[in-house]
Image: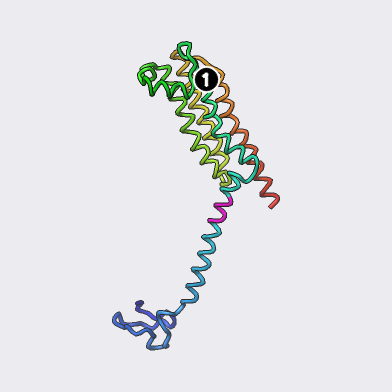
């Protein structure tokens, strides 16, 4: 219990246990109760409004428009392109399925061959970076959302190209799937721009 009456400010003994103030007879425990309830209600409404805006922003960034839906799907298209022959190593075509089969049947054929190993790592980079790119895109509605989207998409492209170049230096060569992966990694960048313009138009109309 406070050492002062919340209404009149009368000093109370630390051992004063009665519910009412001896000076103004105010119920110390219930004083301001309605005000506290109202403050809690206003606070809860603000928190719910913030959460509601968060969900609305996620919806706009993911499925709020046709561009948003296409963009969300586009993050995983490079993974599908890995099913096409991406490289050639020792005259053999290499795609995601073939390299997984090699690892299962004879892992040394992949991990002891530098070119094959780099091909495998480049595939892994495409798969592992696609999910973060998709997750980051959900926050496109935030202040720096567009910049983050472009940075992550550019990072995915740079990593894949760098690993591919390293594979080429060690004996691998380009196959049609390589071009498909690059083009499908560039696609989200254009969709980021379209989505940004779409969000602007929506804000103006609102």
Q: Is residue 183 above or below residue 58?
A: above
Between 90 and 16, the residue placed more toward the observer is: 90
When asked about the image quadrant of residue 104, the answer is top left
Between 92 and 1, the residue placed more toward the observer is: 92
Left or right side of 33 for 189: right
Left or right side of 104 for 84: right
Between 89 and 48, the residue placed more toward the observer is: 89
Count residues near mark 1 (Cα–Cα under 10 Å), then give few for <14, some for 14-19, many for 20+. many
Question: Residue 98, how many percent across, how many down?
Answer: 46, 21
Q: Residue furthest left?
A: 15
Dominant secondary structure of the residues highlighted in magenta in the image: helix
Left or right side of 84 for 90: left
**How many numbered circles are shown?**
1
Which residue has dot 1 on it? 85
- Does residue 45 belong to the magenta stretch? no
Q: Residue at x 52, y 35 (%)?
A: 152
Quarter of the picture containing the N terminus is: bottom left
Q: Is residue 150 above or below residue 176?
A: below
Left or right side of 24 for 82: right
Q: Residue at x 38, y 17 (%)?
A: 109
* Colouring of the image: rainbow
Badge 1 marks a residue whose secondary structure is: loop
Q: Residue at x 40, y 79 (%)?
A: 29
When asked about the image quadrant of residue 197, the answer is top right
Question: Residue 185, how many percent across, how many down?
Answer: 56, 29
Provide the residue span drawn in magenta.
51-56
Between 25 and 198, the residue placed more toward the observer is: 198
Question: Residue 11, how many percent across, how many down?
Answer: 36, 82
Q: Residue furthest top?
A: 91
């Amino acid at each position: 219990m406070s050492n002062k009456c919340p209404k009149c400010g009368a000093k109370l003994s630390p051992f004063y246990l009665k519910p009412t103030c001896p000076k103004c007879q105010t119920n110390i425990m219930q004083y301001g109760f309605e005000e506290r309830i109202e403050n809690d209600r206003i606070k809860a409404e603000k928190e719910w409004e913030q959460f509601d805006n968060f969900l609305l922003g996620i919806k706009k960034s993911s499925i709020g428009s046709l561009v948003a839906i296409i963009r969300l799907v586009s993050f995983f298209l490079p993974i599908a392109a890995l099913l096409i022959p991406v490289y050639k190593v020792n005259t053999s075509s290499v795609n995601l399925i073939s390299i997984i089969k090699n690892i299962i049947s004879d892992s040394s054929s992949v991990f002891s061959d530098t070119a094959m190993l780099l091909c495998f790592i480049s595939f892994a980079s495409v798969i592992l970076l696609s999910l973060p790119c998709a997750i980051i895109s959900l926050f496109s509605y935030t202040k720096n959302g567009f910049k983050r989207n472009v940075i992550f998409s550019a990072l995915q492209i740079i990593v894949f190209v760098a690993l591919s170049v390293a594979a080429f230096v060690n004996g691998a060569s380009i196959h049609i799937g390589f071009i498909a992966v690059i083009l499908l990694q560039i696609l989200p960048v254009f969709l980021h721009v379209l989505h940004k313009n779409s969000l602007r138009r929506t804000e103006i109309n609102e």
